[in-house]
Image (spheres, coloured by chain):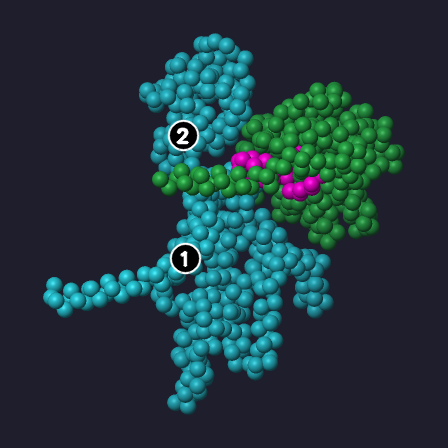
Chain colours: A green, B cyan
């Protein structure tokens, strides 16, 4: 007898709350957008959110997160998707798409897929920017700095600690690249158990010198405090530290490229509005506009002509920086990530 | 019963009846707290326990396959109906985007299962008719392995011991027997031992540093004691994250501690303090100090100082007056303070994450990794249960050793 009563009380209280939550008028003129915070979201605020509000009158209710897919999954499982659009990284896109956490994208309403750089369109997500994980060092402390990725593993030539992202992705690739594997052979090598062993063995050679960072902002901070001699970092973070007066240098050789995506979480209340926002956010001029605030390359080929020359030189995608590079194979990580992450976690703990 | 006894019982009942409204009133006052505890404390713990043994994936995604496996002998390669059932299940799974969830769950127990399930789901989407068996085997011959099927069948149960076993570095072989995880995959007992060790060390240091402070607090003149108390309490009012970050600044290679050590010529080169176990213990000891000091202080305050003087006047030397008269009476505070610090230290997360290196990460850090990055909530819950059980066991052990009446917060 108790259960139906509880049910009724719940229904009643939900009914009482309904007018507060899903006010139709409010839903249409506000859109809740979640991104990665920091300098990146600030660039989006200036380059996308504010201009979108100015053009359409739709207010953007900004949310921040650290890229944890758990947060999106928990929201969807609670049955109340309060966020309309999320900026996710590629592994999250693939995992979420496989597990049905994101809505399918109606590409006819966004744009021609062949205008996007290869590998930056998906049935669940629309590519937005291209960023690079690169090696970086402090020019003020190291006049003759590292030139190639091999120097990351050369503790004789460059003594001191190294900062690395606490994630197997990018690090195993860097290890193989430094071990002499050609960029186009990296994933073929990693697909074999021997290749994974080889990558871990290479990382083993500097294991005691590694300082692991988790949040993107930690990397430039480790460089600034002198805790590490060099670190891998996302290129935008280094650029931003330099804007604040640092002299950090980026080693573009063997940079690893990856992209971010706009997705609509499952059950988003205003799917039309979400899609309209995404369409605007990836318009060539808007994408090019973001490069004024943060040096992340636009994913649409047609956006290149709108990028100012002084901004182009800082982009990972500009020709002078794109000499030797690797594009992160997110399909590989979706298929093998679980295994390798497990090994990485145990390797770290030992 | 004699008449007197019956009277006594009646009086007793009457008193209870008379007290009932008061008891109800008291209960209704406590009701908000009880509801709060149920919602915010009991329910999450129950959810944790359920998640640690829950096993919905295989049951929900492969209902037909599990039914077809009912009559399977467990040793040979199954026959066509099982493969046909799996094909039908995977077709549905592909449409509902649940194949990845199943693949991920089975991947915990069979290496490479995630990509195998996804590739097979893609294949069956294009197949309209059977026979399926040979096509499955052609795609991946491991589909013929009885071990794969044994593990799938085993996971048809609504409960699984997998997460709890993994959290204890154990695993279940396809034939069901429990064995120890080999070599480099066994990390969790090590992590648990490390967590207990660090918590024990921090407790010891807070006691060594905090006991004299508590004693001085009780005997110092009021004005000075007030200032000292403020200094003990001030860190307690500062956010944990802020204090941890402050330690990052102090401990780093170019930080003040290293500057001082270098200036005093105590070391020739800068000492690595940040990202080490030493740094973690230092920072945690500082953060935990007030929790150890306050219970000791409040117990010490209740001990009459005249007793020490009496012992001295009866001829006891200072050390024996202290150790035989004073110290035993402070024991309840010491136990309460140490227990609090030890149990709080077991759950530390932010400080080891920011100040420690990869080998200083505690159980909580792994729980966070499995929740946020790997989306393996079952294993996170399993580790949580292990931590909960260890904490309760230590608490009960303390009670047993010193007696519940001996633990005093003041």
Q: Quadrant of the rendered structure where residue B408 is? A: bottom left
In magenta, the rendered stretch is: A60-88
Relative to the observer, which residue lies in front, A79 or B4?
B4
* Residue in the picture at 54% in, 47% down: B365
Can the viewer see residue B397 in this picture? no
Residue named by callout 1: B28
Kindly identify the residue that appears in the image at 51 percent across and 29 percent down.
B101
Secondary structure at numbered mark 1: helix
Quadrant of the snapshot with the C terminus of chain B = bottom left
Check the residue under mark 2 and report the chain it is in.
Answer: B
Q: Residue at x 36, y 30 (%)?
A: B175
Q: Position of residue B198 (x, y in %)?
A: 51, 57
Is label 2 or label 1 in front? 1
Residue B155 - label? 2
Furthest-right residue in this view: A309
Q: Position of residue A46 (x, y in %)?
A: 79, 40
Question: Which chain is mark 1 on?
Answer: B
């Amino acid at each position: 007898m108790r259960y139906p009563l509880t049910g009724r009380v719940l229904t009643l209280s939900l009914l009482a709350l309904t007018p507060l939550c899903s006010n139709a008028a409010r839903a249409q003129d506000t859109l809740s957008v979640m991104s990665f915070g920091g300098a990146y979201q600030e660039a989006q605020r200036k380059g996308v959110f504010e201009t979108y509000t100015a053009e359409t009158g739709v207010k953007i209710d900004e949310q921040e997160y650290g890229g944890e897919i758990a947060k999106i999954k928990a929201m969807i499982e609670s049955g109340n998707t309060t966020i309309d659009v999320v900026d996710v990284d590629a592994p999250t896109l693939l995992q979420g798409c496989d597990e049905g956490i994101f809505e399918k994208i109606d590409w006819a309403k966004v744009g021609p897929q062949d205008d996007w750089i290869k590998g930056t369109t998906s049935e669940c997500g629309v590519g937005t920017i291209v960023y690079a994980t690169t090696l970086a060092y402090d020019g003020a402390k190291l006049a003759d700095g590292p030139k190639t990725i091999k120097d990351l593993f050369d503790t004789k030539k460059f003594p001191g600690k190294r900062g690395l992202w606490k994630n197997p992705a990018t690090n195993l690739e860097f290890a193989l690249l430094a071990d002499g594997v050609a960029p186009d052979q990296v994933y073929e090598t990693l697909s074999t158990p021997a290749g994974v062993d080889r990558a871990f063995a290479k990382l083993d050679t500097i294991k005691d010198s590694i300082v692991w960072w988790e949040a993107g902002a930690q990397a430039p901070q480790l460089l600034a405090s002198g805790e590490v001699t060099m670190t891998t970092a996302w290129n935008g973070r280094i650029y931003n530290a330099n804007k604040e007066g640092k002299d950090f240098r980026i080693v573009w050789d063997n940079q690893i490229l990856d992209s971010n995506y706009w997705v609509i979480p499952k059950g988003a209340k205003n799917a039309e509005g979400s899609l309209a926002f995404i369409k605007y956010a990836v318009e060539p001029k808007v994408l090019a506009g973001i490069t004024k605030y943060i040096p992340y390359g636009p994913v649409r080929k047609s956006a290149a002509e709108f990028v100012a020359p002084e901004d182009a030189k800082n982009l990972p995608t500009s020709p002078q920086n794109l000499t030797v590079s690797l594009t992160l194979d997110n399909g590989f990580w979706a298929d093998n990530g679980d295994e390798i992450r497990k090994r990485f976690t145990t390797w770290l703990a030992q | 019963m004699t008449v007197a006894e019956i009277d006594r019982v009646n009086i007793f009942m009457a008193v209870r009846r008379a007290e009932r409204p008061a008891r109800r009133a008291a209960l209704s006052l406590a009701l908000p707290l009880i509801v709060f505890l149920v919602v915010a404390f009991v329910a999450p713990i129950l959810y944790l326990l359920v998640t640690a043994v829950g096993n919905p994936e295989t049951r929900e995604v492969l209902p037909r396959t599990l039914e077809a496996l009912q009559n399977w002998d467990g040793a040979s390669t199954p026959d066509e109906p099982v493969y046909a059932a799996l094909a039908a299940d995977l077709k549905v799974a592909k449409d509902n985007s649940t194949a990845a969830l199943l693949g991920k769950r089975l991947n915990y127990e069979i290496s490479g299962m995630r990509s195998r399930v996804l590739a097979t789901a893609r294949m069956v989407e294009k197949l309209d008719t059977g026979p399926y068996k040979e096509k499955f085997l052609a795609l991946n011959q491991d589909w013929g392995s009885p071990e794969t099927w044994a593990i799938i069948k085993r996971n048809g149960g609504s409960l699984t011991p997998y997460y709890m076993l993994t959290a204890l570095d154990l695993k279940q072989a396809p034939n069901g027997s429990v064995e120890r995880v080999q070599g480099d995959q066994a990390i969790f007992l090590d992590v648990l031992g490390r967590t207990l060790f660090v918590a024990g060390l921090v407790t010891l240091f807070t006691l060594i540093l905090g006991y004299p402070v508590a004693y001085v607090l009780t005997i110092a003149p009021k004005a000075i004691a007030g200032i000292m108390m403020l200094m003990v309490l001030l860190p307690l009012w500062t956010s944990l994250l802020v204090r941890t970050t402050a330690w990052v600044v102090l401990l780093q290679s170019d930080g003040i501690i290293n500057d001082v050590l270098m200036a005093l010529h105590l070391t020739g080169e800068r000492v690595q303090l940040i990202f080490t176990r030493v740094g973690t213990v230092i920072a945690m000891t500082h953060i935990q100090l007030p929790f150890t000091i306050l219970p000791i202080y409040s117990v010490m305050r209740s001990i009459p100082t005249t007793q020490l003087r009496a012992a001295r006047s009866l001829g006891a030397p200072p050390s024996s007056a202290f150790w035989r008269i004073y110290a035993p009476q402070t024991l309840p505070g010491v136990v309460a303070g140490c227990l609090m610090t030890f149990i709080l230290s077991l759950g530390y997360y932010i400080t080891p994450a920011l100040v420690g290196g990869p080998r200083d990460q505690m159980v909580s850090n792994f729980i966070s990794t499995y929740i946020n990055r790997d989306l393996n909530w079952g294993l996170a819950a399993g580790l949580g249960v292990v931590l909960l059980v260890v904490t309760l066991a230590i608490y009960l052990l303390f009670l047993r050793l010193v007696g519940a009446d001996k633990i005093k917060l003041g």
